[in-house]
Image (spheres, rainbow, N blue to C red):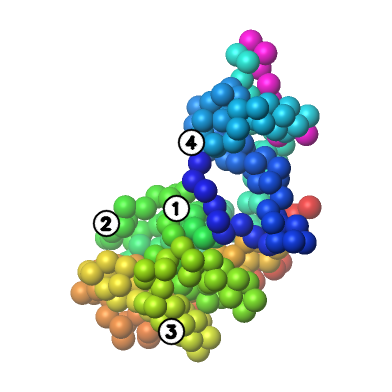
Amino acid sequence: MRPRDDTPAFLSNDTGRLIEPVCRGFSILEAFIGAVQWLGNEELAAITGIPKATVPRLTRALAALGYLEYRPGLRKYGLAPAVLALGYSAVGSCEAAGFARAQLQQLADSTQTFVSLVSRDLLDLVMQVNCHGATTALTLGLSAKSRLPISSCPIGWALLAGLPERERTYLMSHLRDREQRHWPFLLSRLTRSTREVEQHGFCISIGEWASDIAVVAAPLQIAHGPAMALACAGPKASLTRAHLSETVGPRLKAVADILQLGSAACPEAH
């Protein structure tokens, strides 16, 4: 389990120290992502780095709360329905995945680009929906649930640009700690992207994510949901700055506006 030094303030107590049992409980649940269905306490300790003596107390508590299921015959734990309920609630709260796909596919077809919808998980981006135009083979090697550092690509810069200033400042302080070597460039690029988003609703990047790729990205504010962003990407030979600025960017922003309005019309999930 990769360590996370970018934990949000709500997982800290009033002295600024992390609430360790809460973080460890989430680490136990995260251990099942991409793993086999059933894991024993020793396996969970090895995956998470949590002391072996502590893991049984955490798994018993999570089982009592309905987040883990214990199989006596296996002497192992698996994810329980309460975790699935949280996942369904998260998807339902933003109403993005199903509603967005048709809109994104139309955008990909009309612009002949690779289109992505991402959400934020701490300092990473998680790909939620990817579409590409009928004549576009470009995928950038990304698929649904792929993860990228939020500071590594234009779509992450757009997502940050769309956040409230206080939240953006908080995240950028952690990005500075994680990206010390590249921070001067990243700060300059994030500042420019924020200015472009404020002026146009989207930001443009040519040859920065990859030398032959052009990208236009826009933040997406989903009602009652997580911070998200949209991007169109394609070969820079066909996606000139003028084309991105005058055609693709405005279409991308229009789709973001449609998704935002659609989510606002949906009742908040409880």
Closer mark to the observer between disc 2 and disc 4:
4
Q: Earlier in the sequence, mark 4 or mark 1?
A: 4
Where in the figure is residue 263, as x and y percent of width and height?
A: 66, 65
- Residue at image coords 41%, 81%: 188
Q: Is residue 25 above or below residue 121?
A: above
Q: Residues within 10 Å of mark 4 (few under 14, many from 20)?
A: few
Q: Residue furthest top?
A: 73
Q: Secondary structure at mark 3?
A: helix
Amino acid identity at mark 2: Ala
**Residue labelled with disc 3:** 192
Q: Earlier in the sequence, mark 3 or mark 2?
A: 2
Horizontal side of residue 162 vs 205, given as left or right? right
Q: Which mark is residue 34?
A: 4
**Residue labelled with disc 2:** 137
Q: Secondary structure at mark 2?
A: loop
Residue 231 visible: no
Residue 19 visible: yes
Measured in 3D between alpha carbons, the distance from the residue under mark 1 to the one under mark 3, in whole angstroms, is: 24 Å
Measured in 3D between alpha carbons, the distance from the residue under mark 2 to the one under mark 4, in whole angstroms, is: 27 Å
